[in-house]
Image (spheres, rainbow, N blue to C red):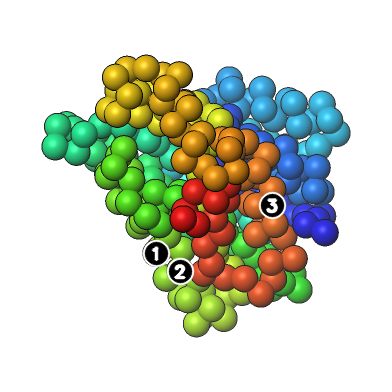
Amino acid sequence: MNRLDNKVALISGAAKGIGAETARLMSQAGAKVVVADVLGDVGRATVKSITDEGGDALYVDLDVSREDSWAAAVEAAVGHFGKLDILVNNAGLFLGQDFEEVPLDDWNRLVSVNLTGVFLGTRVCAPALRKSAKDSPHGSAIVNLSSIAGLVGAPLDPLYSMTKGGVTVFTKSTALDFARKKDRIRVNSVHPGVIDTEMGQQTIETGARMFSENDTDLALKRSIQRHPMGRLGTVDDIARAIVFLASDDAGFMTGSSLVVDGGLTAA
Ligand SMILES: NC(=O)c1ccc[n+]([C@@H]2O[C@H](COP(=O)([O-])OP(=O)(O)OC[C@H]3O[C@@H](n4cnc5c(N)ncnc54)[C@H](O)[C@@H]3O)[C@@H](O)[C@H]2O)c1
């Protein structure tokens, strides 16, 4: 189940957090992985931890907001491993600012990573994914990291929520477009609740500032209480969902939104 043998995967924002765990699990599932990030030292350490366990991994510099950077990353990945079967559009930013006060430059930076990054990743990787799909019984796969904030309203950060809502619908639209063109590239999105990463911590700190009188412990308690299962998510919870969607076990899934939130949006 959920095997990725002989697959090559490129994961954006994979130096740390959900992306790094996804690279580790994909390697354990048999894939060759490309760890792509703006954080060279951290990304190379992630690659080392994977190769130390016997995996096959490569670090490439990638700023998802720049098309030339995507082109160089894909060229390096295909040059090294010979093909590309899986793209995980994982790199993302969270602002945690009141939209009535946020400087326009911060908004533009958010959009350049959360939206332009996903658009460019999909566009630049499409030719390589289309090519490898021809040799694979179930085709190629793109997994986009959206959020519960891309499904329901998020008072903590309406701007982040707007970008993630865009990712949700772009996922469905590109899934339909690739299917119409018979490219055999499946596209699905994952929607995490609050996950225990640096970004997850940033959401707790924002919650403390906005709704909990700067009390981080109280904000954490409230964040946990919002999840009916009574805990925050882990990087492993999310990486497992991503591996599944990238694998041939999800061969009849495209345009779907996989919610992994401990029940938060079920209420
Ligand atoms: N942590 C959560 O609670 C949570 C919840 C829902 C959705 N998500 C989404 O999951 C994804 C991963 O989140 P995370 O919690 O691991 O975040 P994180 O902040 O821990 O890691 C994000 C990674 O993206 C990289 N990155 C940032 N800008 C980049 C750029 N321009 N080009 C390339 N890489 C860049 C960072 O260097 C970092 O390695 C994001 O898209 C995020 O929005 C996270």
Q: Looking at numbered disc 2 in the image, what kind of residue is underneath it?
A: Lys
> Residue lying farthest right?
54
Instruction: Write down the quadrant of residue 231 in the picture.
Output: top right
Asked if one can make out residue 79 in the rendered structure from this viewpoint, the answer is no
Task: Give above or below for 264 relative to 127.
Answer: above
Picture residue at 57% right of the left edge, 81% below the top: 182
Q: Earlier in the sequence, mark 2 or mark 3?
A: 2
How many neighbours does mark 2 have within 10 angstroms: few (below 14), some (14-19), or many (20 or more)? some
Q: Which residue is mark 1?
A: 169
Q: Is mark 2 within 8 Å of ligand 1?
A: no
Instruction: Write down the quadrant of residue 143 in the picture.
Output: bottom right
Picture residue at 56% right of the left edge, 30% below the top: 196
Image mark for residue 243: 3
Q: Are marks 3 and 1 in contact (CB under 8 Å)?
A: no
Q: Secondary structure at mark 3?
A: helix
Percent coordinates x, y for residue 240 in the rendering: 69, 48
Q: Secondary structure at mark 2?
A: helix
Q: Looking at numbered disc 1 in the image, what kind of residue is underneath it?
A: Val
Picture residue at 69% right of the left edge, 52% below the top: 243
